[in-house]
Amino acid sequence: MQDFADEFALPSGRRAAVRLKPPVGRDLMRAERALRPGDGRTALSIALLAELVLVDGAPARYDDLIDFTLDDLDALFAAAGLASQNPTDSPPKPLSPDLSASASERES
């Protein structure tokens, strides 16, 4: 059994603990196997997170984590030292300048 840090509370009230051993390539490979072809970078980040944490005393599962609130995911990414992998940190970019302009601006 791997060693985990002390449990902490997530914003939702769930309890979580992060594995003490830093992530390695094997964790990334297991995370990739949890995905379907075409799943994006966000899915890979969450699948990797699932390899590193316990939630409510049990190993986290990708299928469960994708339904967590963004606040809980933010806390888990930070605790696991994966803040740079956190897809919720950057605001969405507009699709194009035309789509972000108001309808009246486009008609002019």
Image (tube, rainbow, N blue to C red):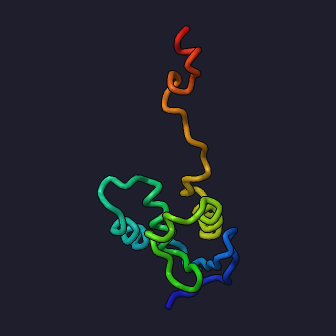
Q: Residue furthest top?
A: 108
Q: Residue furthest bottom?
A: 1
Q: Is residue 16 above or below residue 78?
A: below
Depth check: 104 or 13 in front? 104
Depth check: 43 or 26 in front? 43
In which quadrant of the rendered image does the C terminus lie? top right
Depth check: 30 or 11 in front? 11
Quadrant in the picture for residue 26: bottom left
Q: Residue at x 52, y 11 (%)?
A: 107
Q: Is residue 40 left or right of residue 19?
A: left
x and y, in percent, of residue 47 in the image:
45, 66
Quadrant in the picture for residue 22: bottom right
Query: In the rendered picture of this protein, how many numbered marks are placed on residues?
Result: 0
Q: Residue furthest left?
A: 37
Q: Residue at x 33, y 68 (%)?
A: 33
x and y, in percent, of residue 95 in the image:
49, 32
Q: Is residue 53 left or right of residue 10?
A: left
x and y, in percent, of residue 68 in the image:
56, 65
Q: Residue at x 32, y 53 (%)?
A: 38
Q: Residue at x 61, y 68 (%)?
A: 76
Q: Is residue 97 above or below residue 70?
A: above
